[in-house]
């Protein structure tokens, strides 16, 4: 089963350039969580699945810690989710910086990462 959180918008302070840690930028985060436990499809109980509101809190907390690289932020988020949610087998995350300082108009620049639980 996949649990998805789409188009989470968070203002944060990531980047290699010093001014990025001062002015900040909007980021869009998308997550897909692979969950092998499908008990919730029968039980209808939140305790039998992954509470995506709690996943959002992890994303928000980690996004608010400034980093130079979005790769680092992706790694922190995926590790935190795998640590805190035992039902999650894998996390795929995409983080897009909406207005990167690259000297060109673009729809954003980003990083995508998939991490699986180690057996």
Image: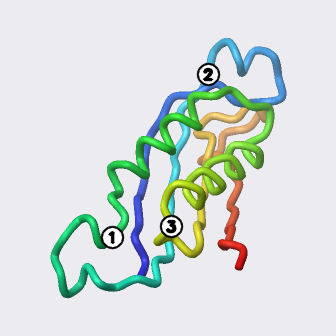
Residue 97 coordinates in the image, percent (x, y): 63, 41
Name the residue carrying label 2: 24
Disc number lying in front (2 or 1): 1
Q: Is residue 109 visible?
A: no
| Residue 114, quarter of picture | bottom right
Q: Is residue 56 visible?
A: yes
Q: Residues within 10 Å of mark 1 (few under 14, many from 20)?
A: many
Name the residue carrying label 3: 86
Residue 42 coordinates in the image, percent (x, y): 19, 87
Going from N to C along the chain, the mark reached first, 3 or 1, is: 1
Name the residue carrying label 1: 49
Residue beneath the point at 50% across and 76% down: 34
Going from N to C along the chain, the mark reached first, 2 or 1, is: 2
Residue beneath the point at 58% across and 39% down: 98
Q: 61 left or right of 20?
A: left
Given residues 49 and 93, the one toward you in this image is 49
Which quadrant, please, contains the C terminus? bottom right
- Kind of element beneath mark 2: loop
Tell me whether circle 2 and circle 1 mark residues in contact (CB < 8 Å): no
- Kind of element beneath mark 3: loop
């Amino acid at each position: 089963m996949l649990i998805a959180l789409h188009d989470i918008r968070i203002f944060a302070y990531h980047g290699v350039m010093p001014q990025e840690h001062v002015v900040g930028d909007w980021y869009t985060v998308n997550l897909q969580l692979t969950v092998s436990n499908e008990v919730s499809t029968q039980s209808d109980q939140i305790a039998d699945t992954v509470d995506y509101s709690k996943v959002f809190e992890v994303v928000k907390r980690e996004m608010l810690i400034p980093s130079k690289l979005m790769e680092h932020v992706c790694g922190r988020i995926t590790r935190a989710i795998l640590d805190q949610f035992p039902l999650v087998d894998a996390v795929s995350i995409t983080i897009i910086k909406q207005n990167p300082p690259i000297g060109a108009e673009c729809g954003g620049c980003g990083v995508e990462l998939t991490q699986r639980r180690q057996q």
